[in-house]
Amino acid sequence: MKTLRKQAGYTQEQIADALDVTVAFISNIENDRVKMNLRVLSYYAKLLNVSIDYLLRPESDENGEKDDVLNKEILRLLEKFSTDDKEKFVKVLRILCK
């Protein structure tokens, strides 16, 4: 959770304010000292733009999590591109992948 929060650019204070909980509660969640109820879990997932299922998975693959967050960010940014710019972007990616 901590990794996702940081990658999304949120502080514990911002998450706590958005969820109407204390910073201590967010810290306890991130350190596996307490569990979230469904309401908090749902809002937390929404804030971080991930599914509840994603939050419930064990954090055994931190690189996979980073990749997921980066992939979502890339897709979000690509939505702002024109079709022409998307085609150019794909060409650049193909060159970089060779």
Image (cartoon, rainbow, N blue to C red):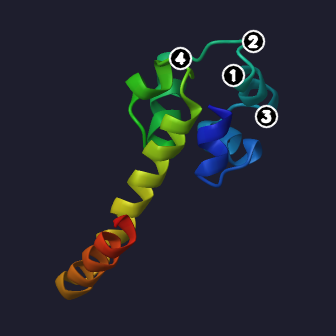
Image check: 20 left or right of 92? right
- How many residues crowd around disc 1 within 10 Å: few (fewer than 14), some, or many (20 or more)? some
Left or right relative to 52: residue 62: right
Q: Is residue 14 above or below residue 84?
A: above
The disc, 3 or 2, on the residue closer to the chain's N-terminal end is 3
Mark 3 or mark 4, which has the lower sequence index?
A: 3
**Is 3 placed above or below 37 here?**
below
**Residue 23 badge:** 3
For the residues carrying marks 4 and 2, which lies nearer the camera in this image?
Answer: 4
Question: Residue 29 got which mark?
Answer: 1
- Check if mark 1's residue and mark 2's residue have beta carbons within 8 Å: yes
Q: CA distance from mark 3 to mark 2?
A: 13 Å
Residues packed near mark 2 inside 10 Å, few (<14), some (14 to 19) or many (20 plus): few
Residue at 69% in and 38% down: 16
Cα separation, mark 1 vs mark 2, equals 6 Å
Q: Which residue is mark 4?
A: 58
Q: CA distance from mark 4 to mark 1?
A: 13 Å
Q: Quadrant of residue 3?
A: top right
